[in-house]
Amino acid sequence: MKESGNSGQAAEFETSENKGDMGKVKLVEQICDYIRSNLISSLTLVDLESKFGVRGYTIQRWFKDIMGITPRKYMEEQRIHKLKINLRKGEPMPQAIYSTGYRSQSWLYEDSLSKLGMVPSAYRKGGDGETIYFLTGRCVLGTLIVAETEQGICAVSIGDSEEVLELALRREFYKADLQRSERARERLNSLLQYFEGQSLNLPVALQGTDFQQRVWTAIASIPYGETRTYNEIAEIIGKPKAYRAVANACGANHVPLVIPCHRVVRKDGSLGGYALGVDRKKYLLEMEKRNSSKR
């Protein structure tokens, strides 16, 4: 998206500081909805300016403050998300790409590894050819499952049923070669030892946007037994207003415990959300606090 010039047609209210953070957040949420609904259009900042009555440069600044990325980057990420869905449905490559709004396959093939995490043909096959090893075990919070590739851990979850956890794993990597294997025993043991007070330092194989990767790196640096707020993580990565985007990145973390997003809480001290459940988040924080006092 190109920045718009001073057209004189945009509303002037954004020049006032009276808009407030909540008003900015609401506007950015509306812009996100609009972008997702118009992926096949070549939206520009001029288009957004005309639609929402806010100058393009202001939209750019507010959007980046709150989402951590520009509107153009957000549109590309949403197109990639739609492309993945299309490929999983088995759509032919040209059709799958064109329905996202792009008119050239070169957009994808120029850097398919960063966009899809693998070459397009492999992704269209649902990860066919990828080998993932997994094991399950019992921990104090239920059944624990860990899955890994040659590059590192790609999934961790806790649930009440081994069958449900395995089904969810197979749904995520629906054509990969998933093998219940003792090759994952070392990783599983490390995770089980975490519940006995051991810190974790394990390799991960986790695909994400640049922003998500920065958030996850910051979260991984939170010491055992300590917490940070979503706002503090946003400040650490240099995006102090993007605390909502930080929370979204936490939700996209498929390797909880390893990347300890349970250590990220709200500014008022309340726990906030957690993929494994708020009760488990509370337990993990209390467990780490107890263990830290013994060290």
Image (spheres, rainbow, N blue to C red):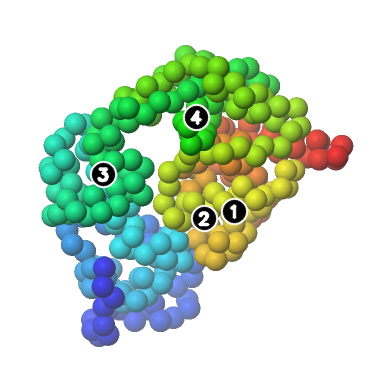
Give residue 108's position: percent from left, percent from top: 24, 50
| Measured Cα–Cα span from mark 3 to mark 1 | 28 Å
- How far separated are the C-alphas under marks 3 and 2? 23 Å
Q: Secondary structure at mark 1?
A: helix
Cα distance between the residues tagged 4 and 2: 22 Å
Q: Can you tell which mark lies on residue 82?
A: 3
Q: Amino acid at mark 2?
A: Arg
Horizontal arrangement in the rendering, residue 190 relative to residue 275 (left or right): right
Whether residues under marks 1 and 2 lie with C-beta atoms below 8 angstroms apart, the answer is yes
Q: Sequence-wise, which precedes: disc 4 or disc 2?
A: 4
Answer with mark 3 or mark 1, whichever residue precedes in sequence. Answer: 3
Q: Secondary structure at mark 3?
A: helix
Residue assigned mark 1: 218
Front of the two marks 4 and 3: 4
> How many marks on residues?
4
Q: Position of residue 228 (x, y in %)?
A: 66, 52
